[in-house]
Amino acid sequence: MSNETNNVKEKMLFGKDKNPSSIEPKKLTLDSHIKFRCHPGVSCFTACCGGIKIILTPYDILQLTKRLGIPAHEFLHKYTLPTYLEKTDMPGIMIKMREEDNKCPFVTPEGCTVYTDRPTACRYYPVGMADFHEGGSRDADGKENTAQEEKFFFTVREDHCKGFEEDKEWTVREWREDQGVDVRDEMNKDWLRLVMRRKSFGLQATLSEQAKRMFFMASTDLATFRRFIFESSFLETYVLDEETIQKLKEDDVELMLFSFKYLAATLFGAQALEIREDKIKDKVAKMKKEQDESVKRSVKEYEELKAQSQKEKKETGIK
Ligand code: SF4
Ligand code: SF4
């Protein structure tokens, strides 16, 4: 196995935007058939669990930390490395391969030790999903255009993978159900959209360091995000009903889904959260004060310039 990190699983998570040789050039639907089986009896068993870039989504992190019974900050420190997501400036994390053999820290000769909670990217192989317009398609008014979303599936066939030689046939739908990717897709959807949206805006649209830090914190450490909601002026700023507040206190998945809404609002100005009336008034008053001050400054500058020019005219005798 190569010691280099390849990015097949990263591609499978974010979809296909170019055509590496391992991607088969054939569009599949949910009813298309594939022949594939992976089990401990294949000669390549666990060969795909090393030298690979596995990006973790917020839901992956949530499930893995629960499985391992450790807090997110400990998990991040022990098992992950920072990375940028999908060639954007959005910070994310990937699994840190073991130093001694460049393999995933969760793999043993018997297989994956976190199998039922394995990351999304590990579940996709060998069937990826492409969604060309996700987060990226806009109509003439600049509004997101979801009507044109075009989804299809494709297979990735890595040379070392013997799973394609096995005698088991599935439809893409059956395969996805078996691997539990439908649930993951639902859980990851809004977060992936944020990344794809950032990608479609391009780097000329700046994102402040503070916004990037917030994206990283909310995406990787829900306990800290929960503290941010309940221990800052958050609840004085946004309108949230009692039921939602209760859910955010107790339910990690609700908290995660809420964090995506919050990020969409703060990063891209999506109207996903309602700001309290008095806060809007404060903000408008602050903006007006700043505006008034800048108008006063320009008037002062103008008066000074005028006085200066009159003085010069007097001195040179020009009328
Ligand atoms: S998490 Fe499990 S399936 Fe994924 S690379 Fe690691 S050992 Fe393999
Ligand atoms: S059959 Fe393919 S997916 Fe299964 S262990 Fe081998 S390389 Fe990995």
Image (cartoon, rainbow, N blue to C red):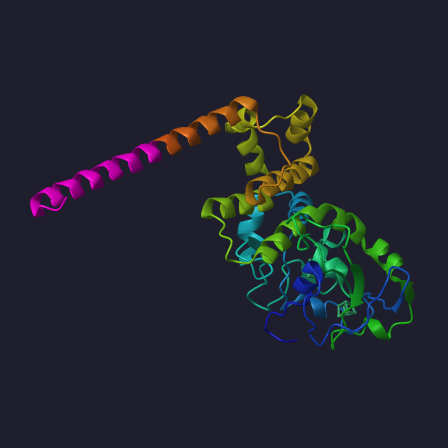
Q: Which residue shows up at 64% across the image and 29% down it?
A: 249
Q: Nearer the viewer, residue 301 or 173?
A: 301
Is 12 placed above or below 62 here? Answer: below
Q: Position of residue 35 (x, y in %)?
A: 88, 69
The correct choice, above or below, for 147 with respect to 16 in the image is above
Residue drawn at x 56%, y 26% is 235
Q: Nearer the viewer, residue 260 or 124?
A: 260
Which of the pair 36/25 is nearer the observer?
A: 25
Question: Looking at the picture, how far across and down is residue 48, in whole percent?
Answer: 71, 68
- Taking 102 as reference, is 125 left or right? right
Residue drawn at 89 percent across, 65 percent down: 32
**Ligand 1: quadrant of the figure:** bottom right
From this viewpoint, is residue 71 visible? no
Count of marks, rendered view: 0
Determine if residue 76 is in view: yes
196, above or below 48, in the image: above
Q: Quadrant of the C terminus?
A: top left
Residue 159 location, x and y as percent? Answer: 74, 77
* Image spot of residue 34 (x, y percent): 88, 68
| Quarter placement of the N terminus | bottom right
Kindly report the secondary structure that dominates the magenta region of the rendered protein.
helix
As drawn, 127 above or below 70:
below
Q: Please report the bounds of the magenta region as a residue range.
A: 293-319
Q: Image check: 61 left or right of 216?
A: right
Please tell me whether residue 82 belongs to the stretch shown in magenta. no
